[in-house]
Image (cartoon, coloured by chain):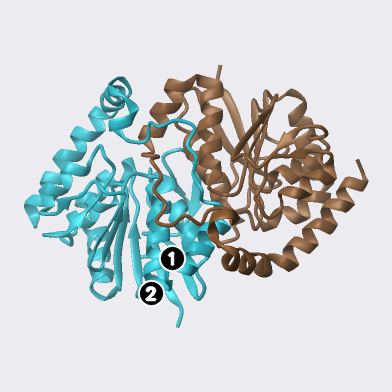
Chain colours: A cyan, B brown
Amino acid sequence: MTFRIGMLIFPDITQLDMTGPHEVFTKMPDTEVMTLWKTLDPVTAGGGMRILPDVTFETCPALDLICVPGGAGMNPLLNDEETLNFIRKQAETAQYVTSVCTGSLVLGAAGLLKGKRATCHWLSRDMLKEFGAIPDASRVVIDGKFISGGGVTSGIDFGLTVAAEILGEDKAKAIQLGIEYAPDPPFNAGVPETAGQDIEQATRDAARARQEERLALVQQAAAKL
Amino acid sequence: MTFRIGMLIFPDITQLDMTGPHEVFTKMPDTEVMTLWKTLDPVTAGGGMRILPDVTFETCPALDLICVPGGAGMNPLLNDEETLNFIRKQAETAQYVTSVCTGSLVLGAAGLLKGKRATCHWLSRDMLKEFGAIPDASRVVIDGKFISGGGVTSGIDFGLTVAAEILGEDKAKAIQLGIEYAPDPPFNAGVPETAGQDIEQATRDAARARQEERLALVQQAAAKL
């Protein structure tokens, strides 16, 4: 039996949220990985890269794993019933319901994370509380069938964790060796605690408008649950 | 002045070689990042993801940085004069000539790495010698205007290193914080030395046919230099 993985894509997605785990997932044997969106038209990511959806909400088969990535473009999805209904329907039968980065807020808006532990990009993690979820600062969080990864690059750690859940540790290690994942960042600035106050503050300042809009949309979505 | 970055894409590319640094590069201020190939038709990566090229070899402007990613599909590029000539021409005027993964073999085939230190995916790193390059097992290698990253995921370390070269350390750190790059692999199997002999041998066995074909094509390309 082919294991079917569907990864949501949408305008203004942070493509690395999706492309990191996509690379891991496509190296899993007997696994089909598809990108999905409302139409088959190219989707333009936040950085301008254009990716083609493989299936639409209508043509997408029942998935064994659904993954919702994040990025600035998830803001409008928080109150988009078409997308939320698609996710809810797939989540009923999927073995795993997963997210990377701010994708967990979309799972929250779909009403799927009540009482569940989940993670999110550090800038938006606290917003999970609005949906009754329990924010967890771990890089990858497993709570039953729900698996979430933190911000952007955590999608690779997330992907390998998922691969190990499904295939066992040895097959996940073989994928890790294949993608030479022995990370060696040139700096130690990946989380606010190590980046230093100036860099953290500059990041918060630059994101303020988007984050304020996001919080309002999260509250609006949470009020409907 | 906009800093122009062009990233080669091609059929059967390992998309994460490209999408990792693409995410970093698109977060650099005053920077334009474009994917490029022979035509504007969608390019299908090794794992099936379809990406649209932004420009062709003909419409591509003079680049400040050219980046050649890798993947199984670089084998045919080793003796593809159209691609090699495009890279040679851009390399003459580019400030930086770069690669991720087995993309360094394509730079070698273009005759650009004679006497230069460079890295490559661990499985193919020794082949750099055929082009007169000096293989270096570091995750990111800088030799003058030539910057190379190792296998697949090293593209993120590579991207941040490039960002620091161009913008300085603080701006690179801000990008690192934005993409929450505090990697925490679930296993320690990213290089043969830590993956264990069984997993290394299985990876070598699975790759044998492609690697034998690659070596023959590398030697054919090297003979023309």
Establish whether labels 2 and 1 are both on one chain. yes
What's the residue at 54%, 50% (across, down)?
B16
* Residue B52 seen by the camera: yes
Q: Label 1 is placed on what type of residue?
A: Val
- Helix, strand or loop at disc 1? strand
Task: Answer with left or right where residue A4 lies relative to residue B46.
Answer: left
Q: Nearer the viewer, residue B221 or A169?
A: A169
| Location of residue B217 (image quadrant) | bottom right
What's the residue at 92%, 47% (across, down)?
B223
Q: Label 2 is placed on what type of residue?
A: Pro
Q: Vertically, is A41 above or below A144?
A: above
Task: Answer with left or right where residue B38 lies relative to residue B139.
Answer: right
Name the residue carrying label 2. A61
Name the residue carrying label 1. A55
Task: Answer with left or right where residue B43 lies relative to residue B159.
Answer: right
What's the residue at 63%, 54% (across, down)?
B13
